[in-house]
Image (tube, rainbow, N blue to C red):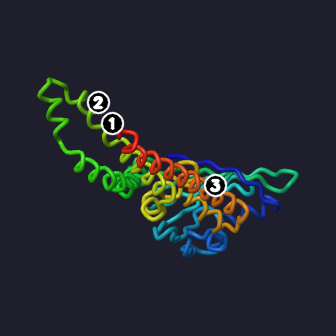
Amino acid sequence: MRVSTTTTIARPPEQVFDTLADLRNETQWNSGVSSAELRSAEPVGPGSRFAIVNSGTAYDATITTYERPSRLVFEARGKPDLTITYGLRPTDDGTEVESELDFRPKGALKVVFSLPGLVLATVFVTFPFVARELIPVMQAAGREEEEAARVLGASGWTIFRRVTLPSVKWGMLFGVILCNARAMGEFGAVSVVSGHIRGKTNTLPLHVEILYGEYNYQAAFAAASLLAFLALVTLVAKSLVEWRSERRPEDAS
């Protein structure tokens, strides 16, 4: 899995290269890095080794390509293994840095740091909202109509489509709205399994956290405002479904 980003830094390429090459500087601007140590002799150069802890995961990183000031490559061993490549190009505004992270998950991590892991985590924490709304409705509706349809020769799919679904559709829709609201705002479960890979496994709440940690307050506020707007839309949809489901018995009478 590869993730690429491009950033412009208002500094000369040599200075940017030296800053990136010394991973001890990660603790100053990357909120996910709690510690970084140089395990080889000074100065930093080809073959320099670092021990770094990122988001609670320990990595042993080695500089494998050191072409100052244009190209820098790290090989990091951990969970997962990854290759970090920096390409630097001088511009009128400073230095354009193209970063590429090549993740190589192992074993169960192939699911964890990927979209399937996000889906599984989200399903695990959100589907109970659908079940909580559907089970009481189905218990109240009873099985008589379904059993009658079966006696009359209806197939399972026909029974579900013509009998079961019409009787539980409002409860199911209400549960789906609650499920969607929880999925949009879920943080804990997806934070554990996502790996925080931008453009691949990063959700909107996680993106807000990363932007805030990078002191990009304007972008963080914009993303948080989008979440707030989606919450308001969800509240409106929830109120409409409640109003429609309450009117249904009156229409039937």
Position of residue 11 measured from the top left corner of the image (x, y, whole percent): 82, 62
Residue at the right extreme?
92
Gap in Å between the C-alphas at discs 3 and 2? 39 Å
* CB within 8 Å, label 3 to label 1: no
Q: Which residue is mark 2?
A: 162
Report the residue at 37% width, 58% height from top: 125
Gap in Å between the C-alphas at discs 1 and 2? 7 Å
Give the structural element (helix, strand or loop) at label 1: helix
Report the residue at 53% width, 70% height from top: 52
Q: Nearer the viewer, residue 63 or 182?
A: 182
* CB within 8 Å, label 1 to label 2: yes
Amino acid type indicated by mark 1: Pro
Of badges 3 and 2, the one in the foreground is: 2
Position of residue 151 measured from the top left corner of the image (x, y, whole percent): 11, 28
Q: Which residue is mark 1?
A: 166
Note whether 146 is above or below 211 in the view shown. Answer: above
* CB within 8 Å, label 3 to label 2: no
Position of residue 171 measured from the top left corner of the image (x, y, whole percent): 36, 48
Note whether 177 is above or below 32 in the view shown. Answer: above
Residue at the left extreme?
151
Gap in Å between the C-alphas at discs 3 and 1? 34 Å
Q: Is residue 140 left or right of residue 109?
A: left
Q: Residues within 10 Å of mark 3 (few under 14, many from 20)?
A: few
Q: Residues within 10 Å of mark 1 (few under 14, many from 20)?
A: few
Mark identifier at residue 219: none
Position of residue 155 measured from the top left corner of the image (x, y, whole percent): 19, 26
